[in-house]
Amino acid sequence: MSTLPDSYLVYPQRKAGPDHAHYPAAPLPDRRPIALPGGLKLGLWVVVPLEFFPLNPSGQPFKAPGAMQTPYPDLRHYTTRDYGNRVGAYRLLKLFAKLGVKATFAVQGAVAERYPQLVRDVAAAGHDICAHGWDTDALHHSGLSAAVENRYIADTLSAIETASGRRPTGWISPARAEGFQTPARLAAAGLRWFADWAHDDLPTRFATESGDLTALPLSNELDDWQILIGYSRPEHEWVAQVGDAADWLLDEAARMQSPRLLTLTIRPYVSGLPYRIKPLGDSLAGVLARAGCGCVQPSELTII
Amino acid sequence: MHRDPNLYDFWPYQDRPKIVWPGEKKLAFWVAPNIEFYELNPPINPSRKPWGRPHPDVVPYSARDWGNRVGHWRLMEAMDECGVRGSISLSCAMLDHHPEIIQACVDRNWEFFSHGIYNTRYSYNMTEAQERAVIEDSIKSVMDATGQRIRGYLAPALTHTERTMDLLAEYEFWYSCDLFQDDQPQPMKVKGNNRLISMPYSLEVNDVITYGVYHQSPRAYADALMRHFDQLLEEGAETGTVMCIPLHAYLVGHPHRMGPFREALRYITSHRDDIWVTTAKEIAEFYLANHYDQSLADIQARGCARPGTGFNPAGDAA
């Protein structure tokens, strides 16, 4: 059995705060109050990923959640994911119109290239659009060369601009995976905010070698995949958990005299199914029926 | 390997031409009992192990045999009570192993479609000749035993090759249940001039998914089935939808699951003024005769049509 070198017990980052230079420690109770438009006490930020799952993924450096599972050709998973872009997304658009919800659709470049009509329909309905990488098999990681990662970013922004007429200013990486250089490359590409990191409940300033980004909060514990698939909970428990989160955050906002954000990722191939759309509607309507709650958009949350 | 199967075109679920099912019905409802045979000691396909443990893996094997001895008869009784004819996803070797089940289904005028020969023989790595043999065996075996010409297919254990859909079209199948991209039928892009459609199979409300993947309770399953139905019925007023309940007697047929399931089936079939309780073959026949051309024209008119056929985006000749 090999042994460890002495350097294994050397701790060069052992000091106050995080072990990187992107943001300092900032305990929640010490924050200055934030402001939301219209005096909202609780802002609901809904994120809808529009993803493309290739039938022949490389699976490198890991297989994205939702990727193909059985031997090629895995028509089962390809078509259940594609259902989201064809059917589920349109069910969501209809629901959002009924409830007055304005969401951020996180669009992958491959979706914009393959299904420009979907992107146009989303934009025409008045929703925000951000970039979500090229596809679920174009994962960002430190093994990518600068040229490849920069091409993923540039191609994605161009494809979305071509389809929607607007160049995105926000980014969520596929599978929220990054390499060490990803934030700096996003900043260098002109992006203003991103939402890969799960380090906070409020927007934070995120320093990179190419300038600062706003890091938007985005829960990785309350989204539809995590609750319904990861934890295998029935839909009514998801509705209850979203309601409990809203109640907690509203109470905290009152106690700490600072608004709070409830962030919710909704996948068309998960929540857009016929048997889940009503619970989703109950969930969103329930949050928005609480006094002081309303939808917010990234442009209202960016701090740099 | 292809990035995209190209078996169907993108077709947004919005402003589609209206489908009205026979009798002015809004939703076509069908039930697909998977009547399967899993072998105790199957040969090994290099791409997939049939059982988790070394053979004989007696508990999962016998649990499936239980479905054919016990569960099937319970499920059939509940379907009889609700007036639902099954569209059977059949491991064709069942014709030999359990003719008593086949006869009971024939007596009820249920439909048969092929789910391969055994659910422990996978399509992966088959030669074209081998895949043809499975299809020809399926057609002939069901014809000999029941007099029915099968028109539908669900690949055994959902295992496919790139040529599966082209072969189904060539052998004059009308529908495949293998694609889960929609709640309405859609023309498939296959070689030759024969028409093949994707039949909505509602995989997400399959009892295997509910119990095996999502680990839900029987009552949660019943609730989901009823909500699924309510939503598709509401949307069916705009343009006709399809709901299937894919079942496996070895799962749904247990005493703790049958009660809630039967409640859901009673609820759904109590809406006969609005729904067409039918079989997959009848849905396919009606769609091909009345809506296939309309769908193709709409896909074309919207600019959604892309060239080529399945796994053949360039449209090269065979």
Image (cartoon, grey):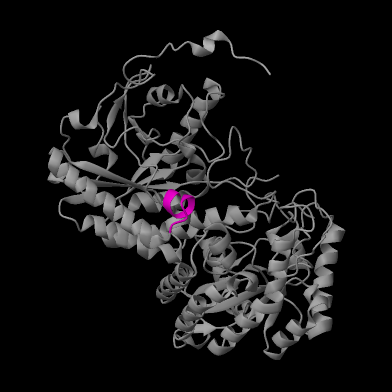
Q: Is residue A98 left or right of residue B110?
A: left
Q: Is residue A238 left or right of residue B9?
A: left
Give residue A234's quadrant in the image.
bottom left
The answer to whether residue A266 is above or below residue A196 is below
The answer to whether residue A262 is above or below residue A18 is below
Please give the range of residues in magenta.
A226-233
Q: Position of residue B129 (x, y in %)?
A: 87, 59
Residue drawn at (37%, 51%), measured in percent from left and top?
A122
- Magenta-highlighted stretch: main secondary structure? helix
Q: Could you say which is closer to the camera, residue A231 or residue A79?
A: A231
| Quarter placement of the N terminus of chain B | top right
Q: Position of residue B256 (x, y in %)?
A: 53, 73
| Quarter placement of the C terminus of chain B | bottom right
Does the image show residue A136? yes
- As for residue A40 lying within the magenta part, the answer is no
Give residue B157's quadrant in the image.
bottom right
Residue drawn at (25%, 55%), measured in percent from left and top?
A287
Does the image show residue A93? no
- As for residue A231 lying within the magenta part, the answer is yes
Q: Could you say which is closer to the camera, residue B31 or residue B318?
A: B31
